[in-house]
Image: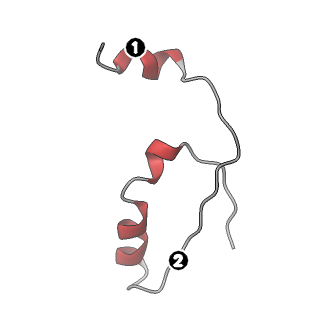
Amino acid sequence: MITATVPLAELFGYASRLRSRTQGRGTFTSRATGYAPVPSGVLNAMPAR
């Protein structure tokens, strides 16, 4: 078992990559653990609304 804290944006597409690399046998679960400010480098790269 692997336990990690990962930004939600990094999980998009993760299930497909995991299944691909484990021949369909890998599974994962996720749960929200809280909120954090967006780092300034990421914030500056986001398009303005």
Q: Position of residue 34 (x, y in %)?
A: 69, 40
Considering only vertical position in the picture, is 11 above or below 38? below
Image point (29%, 18%), residue name: 47
* Placement of the N terminus among the 4 image quadrants: bottom right
Identify the mark nearer the N-term, 1 or 2: 2
Image point (46%, 47%), residue name: 10
Considering only vertical position in the picture, is 30 above or below 45? below
Image point (64%, 49%), residue name: 32
Q: Amino acid at mark 1?
A: Asn
Q: Position of residue 21 (x, y in %)?
A: 39, 75
Considering only vertical position in the picture, is 18 above or below 4? below
Which residue was labeled with disc 1?
44
Considering only vertical position in the picture, is 9 above or below 36? below
Secondary structure under tag 2 reads loop
In the picture provided, is 43 more to the left or to the right than 33?
left
48 and 15: which is toward the camera: 48
Determine whether label 1 and label 2 are within 8 Å by CB. no
Q: CA distance from mark 1 to mark 2?
A: 34 Å
Mark 2 surroundings within 10 Å by alpha-carbon count, few (fewer than 14), some (14 through 19), many (20 or more): few
In the picture provided, is 17 more to the left or to the right than 34?
left
Q: Amino acid at mark 2?
A: Thr
Image point (55%, 42%), residue name: 7
Secondary structure under tag 1 reads helix
Figure disc tally: 2
In the picture provided, is 42 more to the left or to the right than 32?
left
Mark 1 surroundings within 10 Å by alpha-carbon count, few (fewer than 14), some (14 through 19), many (20 or more): few
Residue 42: image quadrant is top left
Which residue was labeled with disc 2?
27
